Amino acid sequence: MSGLQGVGLLLLLWGSAGLLLPGRGALVVSRGHEALQETRGAAISLQKRSTTEATVEVHSVKVDCTVTSRFAHTVTTSKALNKANFSQEIFFEVELPKTAFIVNFSMEIDGEVYVGEVKEKEKAKKQYDQAVSSGRTAGLVKASGRTMEKFSVSVNVAAESNVTFVLTYEELLQRKLGQYEILTRLKPKQPVHEFQIVANIYEPQGLSFVDAHATFLSNELLPLVEKTVTDNKAHISFSPTMDQQRKCPDCDGTLIDGDFIIKYDVKRAQSLGDVQIVNGYFVHFFAPPDLPRVPKNVVFVIDKSGSMRGTKMIQTREAMLAILEDIDEEDHFALIQFDDRIEPWRESLSKATKENVAEGMDYVRNISDRGGTNINDAVLRGVDMLIKDRQQKNLPERSVDMIILLTDGMPYNGEIHLPTIQTNVHSAMGGNMSMFCLGFGNDVDYSFLDVMSKQNKGVARRIFEGSDAALQLQGFYQEVANPLLSEVDLRYPDNAVDSLTTNHYTQLYNGSEIVVAGRLMDNDLDNFIVEVFGQGFEEDFTVQGQASAVDWDMMYPDEEYIFGDFTERLWAYLTIQQLLEQSKTGSPEDKANATAKALHMSLEYSFVTTLTSMVVTKPETEDGPDSPLIADKLTEEQRQQTERVAYLHRPSINAYPASHTYLVDGDPHFLIELPDRHDALCFNIDDKPGTIFNLVREPTQGILVNGQTIGDKKIPPDGKINTYFGRFGIVHHILGVRLEVSTEDISVLQDDKLVQLLWSDTASVTGPNMDLFLTKDHSLTVSLKDSVKFVILLHKVWEKHPYHQDYLGFYTLDSHLLPPTVHGLLGQFYHGIEYEVSDLRPGEVTEKPDATMYVKGQELNVTRGWQRDFRRDVKNGDNVPCWFVHSNGTGLIDGDATDYVVSGLFKRD
């Protein structure tokens, strides 16, 4: 098992006469700016939003978590009363782990219960689309931080009426670094009448330790954490009174602000592990004690492209130094740094002696960023090193081979077709090694890394940009640093079980656990023999034993009911998780079958997964039936996109400027991506075909980039004349470089030598001052020595199209290498721009709100929209949310758009 461990929770509840309050409304849902700042990473939060909101009394908040053999069943309940003499909107939010499945939600209003219903996502989507088109916010689940997602709902409650919200979710806790974790995040903001957190842990295997603490515990609150632990049961509770919650006797502030964390592990006396049989299903937990570690052979493949500049590179070096310092002396390691070039430290792996580690650390200290990104060749070089060292018997026979790839971007050099890279890597590895992919930041294609890892016996992990990125890298490495067994097979009688979850694992790592579940075909347990085989350090691991059912009534005689069907639901949860993973790899038929099975089981067990949605029907209001709300499960890609979309600005933590991307593409759309603010700005420039615009000019180095627009072949029926860029001229006077790029060919003049290339070629031109990489019918990468990098994309249009024709897109990378004197339509933004956005309000289109932007001493009306970045997918592009500045960028750009018109492709004017 791998991935997020533990359970977490956020609960936010407040009331609002929001739909009647001018300028406020349903603040968290529709306005967002203030409230999201308050609740980012926040949890149990009960807030008064205005004097009118004080008439909503939060009566109780209870979190009840029952863990039965690692399977956690969490119920969050909150009750609120509208004490006003008018109806009010009351809001309810819960933060839950992204690995959990919602299984139930209900609202009880004056005795009437409204229950959510789990449906196939495609069917629920129709109701969702209707709700969105009617102007209602229909999505209930949003990404929240790195490991959580936020469920939120609101309901209109009549005067002097009450509402009770209940949300239930389930998940299998995962053992990580020798422990399980349950986390509840608490930020109530105000005292609550009845506030209670209760956790009951039932582990027939026996508890080895249980720890409960909170980040906010003072000397006064510490005694309120009650913990009772017996051999196989733990009870933890935290229930402060209103007075105990207060910061001071006469104030509304609360001491409760932070995380409540429970950590525990179980006893592991038997090598066979623990097999539990309940109600016709079994679960096998396998993590044998006292096994010697198996040496590993690891190749670290480190991206050092220009986008890694600044904090990313600093943190990567910091993490690698810590990893090398802790590497076991029986291990072998290699280091490969790459951009558009592949640069190994040594041509083969080295044993982790003190001398080799010291030399490797010196090498890491000198890794610096530059160039493009050639993932394909870098990984294949690492694979080749492992294969050759195996063939030459330089590595221990009983050892584990792995590649750890760290990258922050997309491949732009060498092989760039993602499925081809995946095929190449899978073929080269041949099932003989594991691959772990660490995606740094938001620019990576996580699904690409995820699939490539799973195809090669590994996992992918996102590394979030932040001050703790180095610790994230080290933490991941610690999870895989100590293999105990490889090729682990867990076997059960063929005639006794069916519907097994995965029972073969490539590796078992120290501090983790393998979990297998299945359905019994009959209740005859006399011959239920369990066998486990694996490859250990010095010899093969083999263990066999007889499984027997646990007598829960005898073990827990005082408990009338303990989540009696937990083994079946655990089996269903694990099966669905594995089917969802299988739906990402394999043949189209295998993917379809896995998806169909996962959907069927999700509906059968009422799990909200990525294939299902929970439809919540709200009670009727005075205006008639309200729109249904939809609770979805977010994929990691959706979470990543949400982070890109976020328009709330936070200060950059980078020690150096972040690597921004500036582009113009399409009709023509200018886009300034600002990753340090998780934001982007965009504008269009409209002019007649044939107009030449200056995009970049830098006088001290003599750099000039101009672009000429082209139009459609003829005026379309709608009468709108579309213009695109069809030619670019690039000059670097000091380096003696001049390029002309059209949709047909490329002319390169360097050191008085002329080279002409066709887009139908795949070619590279290397010179003392400039490198060119041409990918057939796709892109041209121009790398100027010690300076900026440009990428020009070719958009091919069907040659018989009645109106449109081929056109070009222009992208700037590594712009931080240019001095502050750079200017032009794009160049003026290369060193950042200061602006603020506020007063978010509905726009002409529901999905595109308007706002006010303060920039360059002006106040502009801007619209939240999307422009496309075509680097990853030249046909469809990726939507990049941005603030659109109207009227040819007026107010954002210096001067007027006509000020940038020049008379020739290589003219400065």
Image (tube, helix red, strand yellow):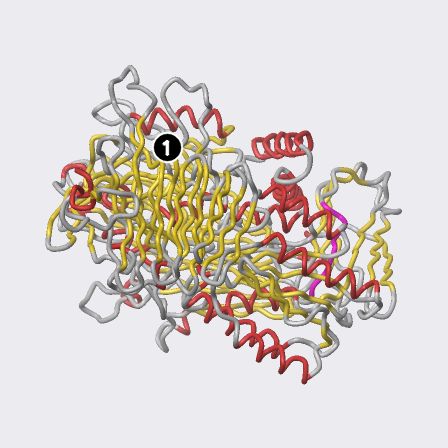
Please give the range of residues in magenta.
502-509
Coordinates of residue 605 in the picture (x, y in percent):
58, 35
**Image vertical order of residue 600 relative to residue 196, above or below:** above
Task: Look at 29% across and 46% down and name the residue there.
Answer: 80
The type of residue carrying mark 1 is Leu
Helix, strand or loop for disc 1: strand
**Residue at point 16% right, 53% down?**
855
Q: Quadrant of residue 233?
A: bottom right
Residue 298 occupies quadrant: bottom right
Query: Looking at the image, how many numbered discs can be counted on the residues?
Result: 1
Instruction: Using the image as rendered, state which of residue 228 and residue 839 is in the foreground.
Output: 839
Q: Is residue 233 left or right of residue 772?
A: right
- Name the side, left or right, on which 603 lies relative to 746: right
Asked if the magenta segment contains residue 505, the reply would be: yes
For mark 1, what is the residue? 629
- The quadrant holding residue 218 is bottom left
Density class for disc 1 (Cα within 10 Å; few <14, some 14-19, many ≥20) is many
Q: Seen in the image, is 185 located left or right of residue 890? A: right
**Residue 638 belongs to the span the image colors magenta:** no
